[in-house]
Image (spheres, rainbow, N blue to C red):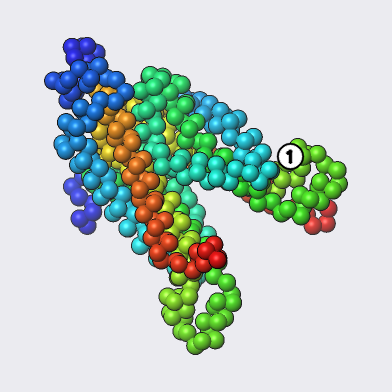
C-alpha cells in the first residue's frame, strides 16, 4: 500500500465531525455566506442568460453563439476568473459575484438554447396553427417540452457556482472556503470538516435539481 | 516597495528589486514576463501539462473500462452513472482536502481528484457513442461473419469515435481548468504563480499572464483534439465535402 503513505491519517474524519459538532453555529454562518454569494451569482446569471437562450432557441438563431459561449466558458478556469475579478474590481462581494456569473452563464445559455431549439417542429407549427402568439408558443409549448435540458443547464451552473464560491475565499469571499484555505487557524480537522460541509451543500443542491428535473421530464398522462 | 511590505504581507515579493513597471503593478509588465519566463512561467506551464495529461490518460482508461461494463451489462449503467455524477458534484477544493488525510499532500491526491472529474463526461460520451451505433451496421457485421470482438473493434468503436472525442475535448479543457486549483495543495502548475501573485498584493501581470497561459493551453489542447478527430474519422467529412 504505497498509495497510503506515512501521511495516512484516518483519525482526521472523526476529528472533523467533532469540529463540525462543536462549531455548528460558526459553520452555519459560513454556509449562509456561501449560499448568499451562490444565489446572487446564480440569480444574476439566470436573468442574463435564460431569456436570451430561450429566445435564440425559439428563433433557431445564434447556434454559433450558443456553442462558442459554452466552449470558451469551459476553458476559463475558476481560479483565474476569481483572480482577474480581483484585479479589476478589488476585494469584496462583487468581484466574486462577477466571476461566478461569468462561470454560470455558459451552461444556462447553451442548454436553454438547445432545449428550445430541439423541440419537435411539427408540435410548434401545430401550436402556431392554433393561433398562439410567438411568446405563447415559447412559454406554453417549447419551454415545457425543453424544460429538462434547461434545468440540466441550471444544475451544472449551480454545481460550478458552489464549487467556485469555495475558491472565492482567496479573494475575501467568505463562505466555507474561508475555513478550507485557512489551515493555520482551523487545523486539518477544521479544513476537512468545512470540506465535508461544502460537499454536502453541493450534493444537496444537485439532488434538489435532479428531483426537479425528474418531476418535469415525466411524460404527461397519455389519457389526458 | 515599502508599501507592499508594510501592508502586512508575510511573503517577500519576488518583484522587489524590479523595474518601475513591476513596482507600479500596472496591467501588464512585459519586463517581468521576460525576466521570469524561465524560472516561473515555463516550469509552471510544463507542470500543468503533466498534471492534466496524467489525469486525462488515467481517466480515459478508467472511463473506457466502465463504459464497456455499462454497455455490456445494462444493469451496471445506473450505479456507475450516479457514482460518477456524485464525484462531479464535489467542489474541487473540498475534494483535494478530503483526500489529504488518505494520500497526503502530494501529486497522488491531486491526480485522484482530477481523474474523478473526468469520469462523468468520458463515461457518458463513450456509452452514448457505443449505443448510437446503428442496428444496420451491427446486422451487416454479423452477416459478414464478424465475431463479437471483431464487431466491437472494427464496427462499434470506430462509429463511437466522434462521441468519444467530443467527450475527450470537454474532459481535457475542464481538467486543464481545474488543475489550477491544485496549487492550493501542491506548489505546481499554472495555479501556483496566480496564487503567489494573489498573496503579493495582487500582482496583476503574473495573474493575467498565468491565467492567459492556462486558457491558451486549454484552447490549444482542444484544437489538437479537433485535428485528431478529423484525421481519425475521415468519413464524417464526406457529406460536407460533397
Q: Is residue A174 visible?
A: no
Relative vertical location of residue A70 with respect to residue A37 in this rendering, above or below: below
Write the residue at 55% across / 82% down.
Answer: B140
Looking at the image, the residue that sits furthest to the left is B17
**A92 sits to left or right of A118:** left
A16 relative position to B36: left or right: right
Q: Residue at x 20, y 17 (%)?
A: B20
How far from the left and from the top, in percent, is residue A22?
Answer: 38, 28
Residue farthest toward the front in the current orientation of the protein: B242
Residue A6 coordinates in the image, percent (x, y): 18, 47
Q: In x, y percent, where is residue B127?
A: 49, 63
Residue most extreme to the right:
A130
Q: Chain of mark 1?
A: A
From the viewer's side, name the closer residue of B149 and B207.
B207
User: Which is more toward the observer, A49 or A17?
Assistant: A49
Q: Residue at x 47, y 79 (%)?
A: B151
Residue hosting label 1: A139
Tell me the residue at 22%/37% (across/down).
B41
B146 or B71: nearer the viewer? B146
* Residue A33 visible in the snapshot: yes
- The x and y percentages for residue A209 are 58, 42
Res. B240 image quadrant: bottom right
Quadrant of the rendering where the N terminus of chain A is positioned: bottom left
Is the residue B77 above or below the residue A206 in the image?
below
Label tally:
1
Query: Does dot 1 land on a helix, a strand or a loop?
Result: helix
Q: Residues within 10 Å of mark 1 (few under 14, many from 20)?
A: some
Q: Is residue A222 left or right of residue A174?
A: right
Amino acid at each position: 500500500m504505497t498509495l497510503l503513505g506515512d501521511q495516512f491519517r484516518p483519525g482526521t474524519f472523526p476529528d472533523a465531525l467533532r469540529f463540525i459538532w462543536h462549531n455548528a453555529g460558526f459553520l452555519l454562518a459560513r454556509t449562509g455566506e456561501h449560499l448568499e454569494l451562490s444565489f446572487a451569482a446564480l440569480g444574476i446569471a439566470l436573468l442574463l442568460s435564460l431569456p436570451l437562450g430561450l429566445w435564440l432557441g425559439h428563433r433557431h438563431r445564434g447556434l454559433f453563439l450558443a456553442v462558442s459561449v459554452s466552449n470558451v466558458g469551459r476553458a476559463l478556469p475558476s481560479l483565474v476568473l476569481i483572480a482577474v475579478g480581483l484585479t479589476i474590481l478589488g476585494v469584496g462581494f462583487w468581484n466574486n459575484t462577477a466571476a461566478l456569473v461569468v462561470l454560470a452563464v455558459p451552461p444556462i445559455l447553451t442548454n436553454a438554447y438547445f432545449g428550445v431549439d430541439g423541440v419537435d417542429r411539427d408540435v410548434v407549427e401545430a401550436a402556431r396553427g392554433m393561433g398562439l402568439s410567438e411568446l405563447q408558443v415559447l412559454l406554453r409549448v417549447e419551454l415545457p417540452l425543453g424544460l429538462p435540458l434547461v434545468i440540466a443547464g441550471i444544475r451544472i451552473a449551480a454545481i460550478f457556482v458552489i464549487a467556485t464560491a469555495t475558491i472565492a475565499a482567496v479573494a475575501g469571499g467568505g463562505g466555507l472556503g474561508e475555513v478550507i484555505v485557512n489551515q493555520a487557524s482551523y487545523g486539518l480537522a477544521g479544513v476537512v470538516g468545512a470540506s465535508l460541509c461544502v460537499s454536502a451543500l453541493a450534493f444537496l443542491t444537485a439532488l434538489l435539481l435532479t428531483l426537479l428535473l425528474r418531476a418535469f421530464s415525466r411524460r404527461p398522462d397519455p389519457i389526458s | 516597495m515599502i508599501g507592499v511590505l508594510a501592508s502586512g504581507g508575510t511573503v517577500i515579493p519576488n518583484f522587489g528589486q524590479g523595474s518601475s513597471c513591476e513596482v507600479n503593478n500596472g496591467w501588464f509588465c512585459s519586463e517581468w514576463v521576460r525576466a521570469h519566463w524561465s524560472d516561473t512561467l515555463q516550469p509552471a506551464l510544463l507542470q500543468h501539462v503533466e498534471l492534466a495529461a496524467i489525469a486525462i490518460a488515467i481517466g480515459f482508461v478508467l472511463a473506457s473500462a466502465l463504459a464497456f461494463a455499462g454497455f455490456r451489462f445494462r444493469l451496471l449503467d445506473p450505479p456507475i452513472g450516479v457514482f460518477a455524477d456524485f464525484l462531479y458534484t464535489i467542489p474541487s477544493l473540498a475534494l483535494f482536502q478530503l483526500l489529504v488525510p488518505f494520500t497526503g499532500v502530494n501529486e497522488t491526491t491531486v491526480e485522484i481528484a482530477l481523474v474523478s472529474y473526468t469520469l462523468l463526461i468520458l463515461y457518458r460520451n463513450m456509452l452514448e457513442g457505443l449505443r448510437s451505433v446503428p442496428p444496420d451496421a451491427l446486422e451487416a457485421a454479423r452477416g459478414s461473419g464478424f465475431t463479437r470482438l471483431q464487431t466491437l473493434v472494427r464496427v462499434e468503436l470506430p462509429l463511437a469515435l466522434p462521441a468519444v472525442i467530443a467527450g475527450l475535448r470537454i474532459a481535457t479543457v475542464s481538467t486543464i481548468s481545474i488543475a489550477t486549483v491544485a496549487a492550493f495543495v501542491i506548489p505546481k502548475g499554472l495555479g501556483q504563480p496566480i496564487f503567489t501573485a494573489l498573496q503579493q498584493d495582487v500582482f496583476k501581470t503574473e495573474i493575467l499572464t498565468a491565467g492567459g497561459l492556462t486558457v491558451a493551453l486549454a484552447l490549444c489542447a482542444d484544437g489538437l483534439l479537433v485535428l485528431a478527430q478529423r484525421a481519425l474519422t475521415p468519413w464524417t467529412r464526406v457529406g460536407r465535402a460533397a
